[in-house]
Amino acid sequence: MLLIDTFILALKNIWSNKMRTILTMLGIIIGVTAVIVIVGLGNGMTESVRESFSSMGINSMSVSIWGRGSSRNATVEYMYQVVEDNRQYLSAISPNVQIGSQVVKEGRDVYRYTGVYGVNEDYISMANYTIADGRGLQYMDIKENKYVCVIGDYLAREAFNGNAVGEDIKVGSYRFRIVGVLSPKSNDPELQEGGEDDRIYVPYTVALRINQKSIVDTYTVIMADENYANQAKAAVENALYAIYEDEDAYYVYSMSELLEQMNQTISMVVMVLTLIAGISLLVGGIGIMNIMLVSVSERTREIGIRKAMGARETTILFQFVVEAGTTSALGGLIGILLGYSLSAAATAAVPLIMPGEAVTINPGTTAVLVSFGISVGIGVIFGFLPARRAARLNPIEALRYE
């Protein structure tokens, strides 16, 4: 009953000094709002990165080979055998040969951002594509160096109005027959130009011929189980070391490893920004202590009367601590509401400011509860000193106070 009466009394005192209370709570409001928005942004960026990596395949590895002047080379057949010998860790592999030539349709329309890659017959499924029309690349296309290709949804719609199979398209001065069209990975047309739906895949043997190269220096490897990413990476590295006997001759990295590094970077940035935002909470606590000291001075006579009528020190202490806690709690609640409002507004604004980007700013329940708890805790801690001062006032001196 004492707690309820004290809480009601605290609300009355706060209400009687509305403007002063709002100014006092401002530091708490700004701090809680900033923490919620920053944590929400961090969560949104982490989720967005995870979704991006999921579309590329978290279970994939990229292998780059430089050779460092070695007389021996890791051939395609050797890399295939590496996968075959490590089936418990590796499930598929494809050479990846990029062609830098411009893409032209009928000598008129030029598609400057279209990526052209030489791959094998397994790459389409490895990259989580599905065939929407026609067929994918086949083993005989690779073996016989056929000038055929599979194109992405964006190019099929933009260049051929959705009827691409059987048509020809030029990559530089080389003409390719389109044998298949891929299903789109993105539903947003603005995301497709230059993206994963704006691609051309040709037999890697043809890509080597166009680039006038005889050795493949980049591979995409799929792990059998991403939980064994370290073992899968070690299997590939050991096989390459056996060829080159030089760790600087190649580089192997997994998408899951890259994802973890990016998440750690985001978490570190969010933590630093949250600590900076926490300074506002500290400033808010100092403001609460300052205003409570003023309140004690203003209500000295009231405190004297209450103590003269038998109020104990603990009762006076409890009253002022509850008032300080209530003030900071109200500031925390307003900060939470403002934080959620700004988060929702930012979520809607991001696609408008950066077309093609979509980040859901969601602070999560834990961040909200922690920030609210800290705001209340700061009010109680910084309100304790003025409350103790009020509780220790001499009732006779307090009654004489003017």
Image: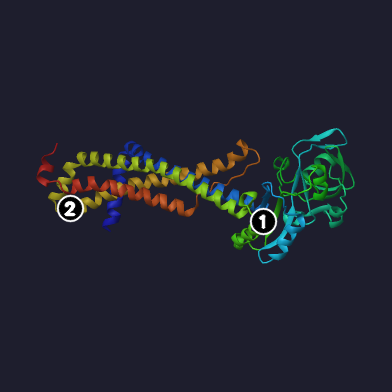
* Residue occupying the far top of the picture: 108
Question: Residue visible at 88% across and 36% down?
Answer: 106
Question: Residue visible at 88% across and 53% down?
Answer: 144
Dividing the picture into quadrants, the one containing residue 191 is top right
Q: Which residue is the site of mark 2?
A: 313
Q: Earlier in the sequence, mark 1 or mark 2?
A: 1
Q: Residue 127, position in %: x, y?
A: 72, 53
235 or 241: which is nearer to us? 241
Question: Residue visible at 24% across and 38% down?
Answer: 294
* Mark 2: few/some/many CA within 10 Å (<14, 14-19, 20+): some
Q: Residue 331, position in %: x, y?
A: 38, 44
Can you say which quadrant of the picture contains the C terminus? Answer: top left
Q: Is residue 341 left or right of residue 51?
A: left
Q: Residue 82, position in %: x, y?
A: 71, 61
Question: Residue visible at 46% across and 54% down?
Answer: 366
Q: Is residue 304 left or right of residue 106?
A: left
Amino acid at the residue labelled 2: Glu
394 or 367: which is nearer to us? 367
Q: Which residue is the site of mark 1?
A: 240
Q: Quick one: SS at disc 1?
A: helix
82 or 230: which is nearer to us? 82
